[in-house]
């Protein structure tokens, strides 16, 4: 490395080390929000000012312009999926991309709607429009999730990693296993059932809602007397187990809420691109 | 064995083996004495299947036995064969306890009571030392062992582990891990808590105790080892337990005492120093030679070459050129003047003051570890703000230091024979000034490890560097046209003080009048406001404090304490005042800095009333970061958990930018007020990981990053030495199918670090080497755009910052969305 290159990296590093921590929404003082706003205003002004013949729709030259901008934006927005997984080469940051993605994605509401000229019907063209709105709607939910949930994820974690949470559960289970030995058959079976149940049992719905109606630990707690010392010991351990499970399930639920929308967002994006292709081909075919 | 041997070689590591093999080849009457029942115990103790490296690659091997990189088993097997084939006279189970006599007639006493007579001795016992033995009756019982190789090989036994450090705890846990082995495991601890062990190990031990998997006896010591029984001294009197096996892990004694008992002198009392040696490896006791790791050469190849050389010398060969001769010749070839290796060694050794005490052998070694440079007049040697922890010494010529960053024409000269760049070495900070050659210069650049070794081995060098460093630091601090004569009275009265982490240097309200300069480490400044300490600021090495009270005569306005183990230079206040009086420029500068500090204090104090909660949070967060090692960091990864969505894109990006292994563990690590310090390298000012790396593979790169180069031999020392647990040992993973192939065809494991199973089976399929090497963050050196972990975070949660910039009120307390 030459001395010159090394010094420029020094400057770059110093700016980085000095920087405030700023979220993707406020990135560079809302640079992309302003850009999106400008794009939307320009599109709206054009729509209002330019005389479109015979009436505003996707077929006029202005409609084509908006359509091309919209298509380009959608294709570029979709590329985030690739960008996210390919960090090198290039000196770019995903935070900047996400920031631009969110704001420019929102501006599609304006650009896309104006492109339709408010002509909605039961056809492949409107399908694409509706899909686009759905993608945007899920995106908006995502941004809400990204700004509200992380703190809760962090609080729930209490400095434990996922692996440590599972280890803690295993440790409780080992103690439970020993403590349950003196119990009567019926109660011992309750404990065994709780131990046998996977902490992940319950499926996607339970994961998302955080409700586990078939939880054997809850059942065992309900069915455990506190008459004898052994029972009290087991009860105390079961309560610990329930608390540990609650932490694990809390983490799963918040993580699921942070991810489930992305799943819809991507699936709808694929559907949108298929619908857009059909839309574009049919437009050119019937030209 | 009877008769007197020409040479007795003690220790059968690579050094001793090679010596013995050469003695056999020359037909010298020799004996190789080895403590254990096998050859080469240090290598024998490597973990099974370890890949042993043969570095430095360009050094030729000069030995009668073979050595090339390969599996531990292969190498040991080959040595066993060759030692037998070469008819080397080996005596196993022959621990040497004492050496008496003199050159020509040494008497070597073995543990068995036998005595071996020899004319000369080659000591090649390495640096492992001896495990501390139990000090109670029965300490030589066969029940006792000092090492545990495989905890899985014992069944149905009552085993007692003695020792409360990590080794003892790990052994006890290992023995108790599998209930199917049905062992009854007891661990003894002399005190009530396990203060010497890692917190994670103690937690595991306590958990195992709660579960009844093993027995922990606190405040208990062994009183007597009997047959299948152990008598214990407990707090409540004596007690006997059944005991079939004792594992004693109470640390080990370095071999120094044993060596000094033979009259061998070491170069200094420092723990890191080595025996004084002649070019023929002879110690200060004539007839006793030291080679290998004990002589300061920890790499196997060096050890083996020295084994060969020392026997050549003993056999009377005076003209033997050391095996490193071609390496040195190559190194000196770039210098002007066409001089020979011997001439250059002479010039460096004679001209450079701090090298005065070194033997030729040490000088050669130092030269091998260092770089030599020639500069034309005016050429830049280093620039202000370049990172660098190496020290320079001028063999010929002189240099000019640009003391004023705004006016390069103001320079201070440094003359032939002196050193420069020592501030970077001591403080770990960036270069404080640009240095140029003033005439044609030949200089030696000592990398950090080599320089530290020099200071440890040569007390004279340490003294010289110290006083130069204090003088320079004063000049640099107070800059503004001061000369050496100006600061001379200060240097004379300056005192170097080490301070523990957390120790108070200046207490608020006190009326002492001294100025302190932080030479290494860092300090935090806090003030009592409303009965609570409020964090005011963080001072990195190179800054000074205490000047306010001196200048305006007031009591101390704030408390300054060490964030980490540090060194400060104490300068008496009146000397400083006198200096200010003579230098109005300096006075203005000091007043300016003082008013800036006052402003920060006032700002935070004013905030305290309005938002006292925010100020408390700020103070506590700053303290939390300092407690987590930020005080010694230069560049640290932090995650704002108010923004982190847990996507682990940071880890994936790190893996994908670095041969497929992530160098950070996002989840692990501490969190306070949603600010999380993940397990990732802090690029410490004085990296602990560098301390004990046999090939010196850990270095500081041009952008300040601490990185491990390709000469890593996978010994795991750095992993053990890093207090933050950020180094992992792993094999280089196989190449993954491309992102496109994964996205379209689902081929391979996808972005990020591939699962262990995939890496393992794929590596096997492709026949890749499985050597586990040390892997750590390199701050994405050479990658466009810098740290991938930061760039790959979609929300801006991950940031890498420098502590002195980040630990300010505005940066820390500012609310992110
Ligand atoms: C985990 C690990 C991995 C390493 N990997 C590598 C690598 O890949 N490549 C590399 O080049 N280097 C490596 N090293 C460094 C290298 O192993 C040692 O520096 C080297 O073995 C030192 O050789 P030696 O002959 O000086 O001493 P040692 O190998 O330590 O041998 C000393 C011998 O002397 C015996 N002894 C000690 N005291 C007495 C006594 N009083 N009487 C009789 N005998 C005695 C001991 O039992 C031992 O057998 C590694 C080190 C470690 C700890
Ligand atoms: C038609 C418009 C849009 C398209 C085609 C689109 C497409 C995509 C795609 C392909 C991804 C990558 C997902 C992945 O691979 O993980 C993504 C991510 C994302 N999108 Fe959109 N998007 C659109 C609009 C929006 C809007 C309007 C918003 C917000 C208001 C939004 C918010 C996000 C967010 C927050 C992410 C996640 C970033 C990350 O976690 O890395 N998107 N989008
Ligand atoms: S590896 Fe550990 S000791 Fe070394 S620089 Fe990084 S944090 Fe510091
Ligand atoms: S700076 Fe680079 S090497 Fe270091 S943790 Fe981040 S991505 Fe990994
Ligand atoms: S990339 Fe950012 S948001 Fe994702 S896990 Fe890492 S720090 Fe958290």
Image (cartoon, coloured by chain):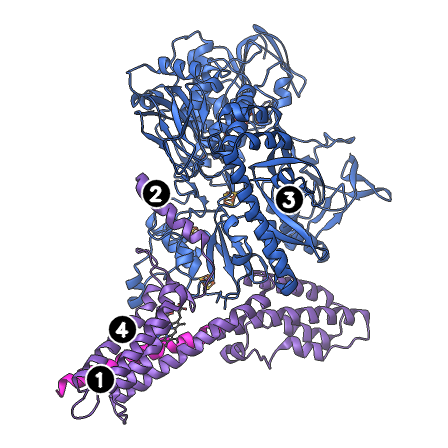
Q: Specify the colour of chain B.
A: blue
Residue, disc 2:
A6
Ligand 2 neighbours mark 1 (CB distance < 8 Å): no
Q: Which percent across, then down, holds residue A11?
A: 38, 48
Left or right, B644 with reference to A83: right
| Vertical side of B599 occupied by B299: above or below | above
Task: Describe the element under mark 1 as helix, strand or loop.
Answer: helix
Task: Describe the element under mark 4 as helix, strand or loop.
Answer: helix
- Work out whether residue A101 or residue B584 is closer to the camera in this orientation and state it: B584
Which of label 2 and label 4 is nearer to you?
2
Circle 2 crowding by C-alpha within 10 Å: few under 14, some 14–19, many from 20: some
Magenta stretch in the rendered image: A258-287
Marks 2 and 3 close (CB-CB < 8 Å): no
Q: Residue at x 24, y 74 (%)?
A: A72
In the image, which disc is placed on residue A75? Answer: 4
Q: Chain of mark 3?
A: B
Q: Which percent across, then down, holds residue A50?
A: 20, 85
What is the number of callouts on the image?
Answer: 4
Q: Which percent across, then down, holds residue A39?
A: 29, 76
Residue, disc 1:
A279
Ligand 4 neighbours mark 2 (CB distance < 8 Å): no
- The quarter of the rendered structure image containing the N terminus of chain A is top left
Residue, disc 3:
B560
């Amino acid at each position: 490395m030459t001395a010159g290159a090394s010094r420029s990296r020094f400057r770059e590093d110093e700016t980085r080390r000095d920087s405030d921590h700023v979220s993707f929404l406020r990135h560079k003082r809302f640079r992309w929000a302003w850009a999106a706003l400008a794009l939307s205003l320009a599109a709206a002004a054009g729509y209002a000012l330019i005389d479109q013949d015979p009436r505003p729709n996707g077929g006029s030259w202005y409609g084509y312009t908006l359509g091309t901008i919209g298509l380009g934006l959608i294709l570029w927005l979709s590329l985030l999926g690739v960008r996210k997984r390919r960090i090198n080469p290039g000196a770019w940051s995903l935070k900047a991309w996400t920031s631009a993605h969110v704001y420019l994605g929102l501006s599609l509401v304006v650009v896309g709607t104006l492109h339709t000229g408010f002509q909605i019907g039961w056809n492949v063209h409107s399908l694409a429009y509706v899909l686009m709105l759905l993608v945007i709607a899920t995106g908006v939910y995502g941004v809400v999730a990204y700004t509200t949930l992380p703190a809760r994820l962090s609080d729930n974690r209490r400095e434990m990693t996922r692996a440590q949470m599972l280890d803690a559960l295993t440790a409780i289970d080992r103690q439970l296993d020993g403590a349950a030995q003196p119990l009567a058959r019926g109660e011992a079976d309750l404990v065994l059932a709780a131990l046998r149940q996977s902490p992940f049992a319950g499926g996607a719905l339970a994961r998302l809602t955080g409700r586990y109606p078939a939880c054997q630990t809850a059942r065992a707690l309900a069915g455990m007397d506190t008459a004898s010392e052994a029972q009290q010991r087991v009860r105390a351990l079961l309560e610990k187990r329930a608390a540990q499970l609650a932490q694990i399930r809390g983490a799963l639920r918040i993580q699921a809420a942070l991810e489930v929308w992305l799943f819809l967002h991507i699936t709808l994006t694929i559907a949108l691109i298929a619908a857009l292709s059909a839309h574009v081909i049919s437009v050119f075919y019937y030209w | 064995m009877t008769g007197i041997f020409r040479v007795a070689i003690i220790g059968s590591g690579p050094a001793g083996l090679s010596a013995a093999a050469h003695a056999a080849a020359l037909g010298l009457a020799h004996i190789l004495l080895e403590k254990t029942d096998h050859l080469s115990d240090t290598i024998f103790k490597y973990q099974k299947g370890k890949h042993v490296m043969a570095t430095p690659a360009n050094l030729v091997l000069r030995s009668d036995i073979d050595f090339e990189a390969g599996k531990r088993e292969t190498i040991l097997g080959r040595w066993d064969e060759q030692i037998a084939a070469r008819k080397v006279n080996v005596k196993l189970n022959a621990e040497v306890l004492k050496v008496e006599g003199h050159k020509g007639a040494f008497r070597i006493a073995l543990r068995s009571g036998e005595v071996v007579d020899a004319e000369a001795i080659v000591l090649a016992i390495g640096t492992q030392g001896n495990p501390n033995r139990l000090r109670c009756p029965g300490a030589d019982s066969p029940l006792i062992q000092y090492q545990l190789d495989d905890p899985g090989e014992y069944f149905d036994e009552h085993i007692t582990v003695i020792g409360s450090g990590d080794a003892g705890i790990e052994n006890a846990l290992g023995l108790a891990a599998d209930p199917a082995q049905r062992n009854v495991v007891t661990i003894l601890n002399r005190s009530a808590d396990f203060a010497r062990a890692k917190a994670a190990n103690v937690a595991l031990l306590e958990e195992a105790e709660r579960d009844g998997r093993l027995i922990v006896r606190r405040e208990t010591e062994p009183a007597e080892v009997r047959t299948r029984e152990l008598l214990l001294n407990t707090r409540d009197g004596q007690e006997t337990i059944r005991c079939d096996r004792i594992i004693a892990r109470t640390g080990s004694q370095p071999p120094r005492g044993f060596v000094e008992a033979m009259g061998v002198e070491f170069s200094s009392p420092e723990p890191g120093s080595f025996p004084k040696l002649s070019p023929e490896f002879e110690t200060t006791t004539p007839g006793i030679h030291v080679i290998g790791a004990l002589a300061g050469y920890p790499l196997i190849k060096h050890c083996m070459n020295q084994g060969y050389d020392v026997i050549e010398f003993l056999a009377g060969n005076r003209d033997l050129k050391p095996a490193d001769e071609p390496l040195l010749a190559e190194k000196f070839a770039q210098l002007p003047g066409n001089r020979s290796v011997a001439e250059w060694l002479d010039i460096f050794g004679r001209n450079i003051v701090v090298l005065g005490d070194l033997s030729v052998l040490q000088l050669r070694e130092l030269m091998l570890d260092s770089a030599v440079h020639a500069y034309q007049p005016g050429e830049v040697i280093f620039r202000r703000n370049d990172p660098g922890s190496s020290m320079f010494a001028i063999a010929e010529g002189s240099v000019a230091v640009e003391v004023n960053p705004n006016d390069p024409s103001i320079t201070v000269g440094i003359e032939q024979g002196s050193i420069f760049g020592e501030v970077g070495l001591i403080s770990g900070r960036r270069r404080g000034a640009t240095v140029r050659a003033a005439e044609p210069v030949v200089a030696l650049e000592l990398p950090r490890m080599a320089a530290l070794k020099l200071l440890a081995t040569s007390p004279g060098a340490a003294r010289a560097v110290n006083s130069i460093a204090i003088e320079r630091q004063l000049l640099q601090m107070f800059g503004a046209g001061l000369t050496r004569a100006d600061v001379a009275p200060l240097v004379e009265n300056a005192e170097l003080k080490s301070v523990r982490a957390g120790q108070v240097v200046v207490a608020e309200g006190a009326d002492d009048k001294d100025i302190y300069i932080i030479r290494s480490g860092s300090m935090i400044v806090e003030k009592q406001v409303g009965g609570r300490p409020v964090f005011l600021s963080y001072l990195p090495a190179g800054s000074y404090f205490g000047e306010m009270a001196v200048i305006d005569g007031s009591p101390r306005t704030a408390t300054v304490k060490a964030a980490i183990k540090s060194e400060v230079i104490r300068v008496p206040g009146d000397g400083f005042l006198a200096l200010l009086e003579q230098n109005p420029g300096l006075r203005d500068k000091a007043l300016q800095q003082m008013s800036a500090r006052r402003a920060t204090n006032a700002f935070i104090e004013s905030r305290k009333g309005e938002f006292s909660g925010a100020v408390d949070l700020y103070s506590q967060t700053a303290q939390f970061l300092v407690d987590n090692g930020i005080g010694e960091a230069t560049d640290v990864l932090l995650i704002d958990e108010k923004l982190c969505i847990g996507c682990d894109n940071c880890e994936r990006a790190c893996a994908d930018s670095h041969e497929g292994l992530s160098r950070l563990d996002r989840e692990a690590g501490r969190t306070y007020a949603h600010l999380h310090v993940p397990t990732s390298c802090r690029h410490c000012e004085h990296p602990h990981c560098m301390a004990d790396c046999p090939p010196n593979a850990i270095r500081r790169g041009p952008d300040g990053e601490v990185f491990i180069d390709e000469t890593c031999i996978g010994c795991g020392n750095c992993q053990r030495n890093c207090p933050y647990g950020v180094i992992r040992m792993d094999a280089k993973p196989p190449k993954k199918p491309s992102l496109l192939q994964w996205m379209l065809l689902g081929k391979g494991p996808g972005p990020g670090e591939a699962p262990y199973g995939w890496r393992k089976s794929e590596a096997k399929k492709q026949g890749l080497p499985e050597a586990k090497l040390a892997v750590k963050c390199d701050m994405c050196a050479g990658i466009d755009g810098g740290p991938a972990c930061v760039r790959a975070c979609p929300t801006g949660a991950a940031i890498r910052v420098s502590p002195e910039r980040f630990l300010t009120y505005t940066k820390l307390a500012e609310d992110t969305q």
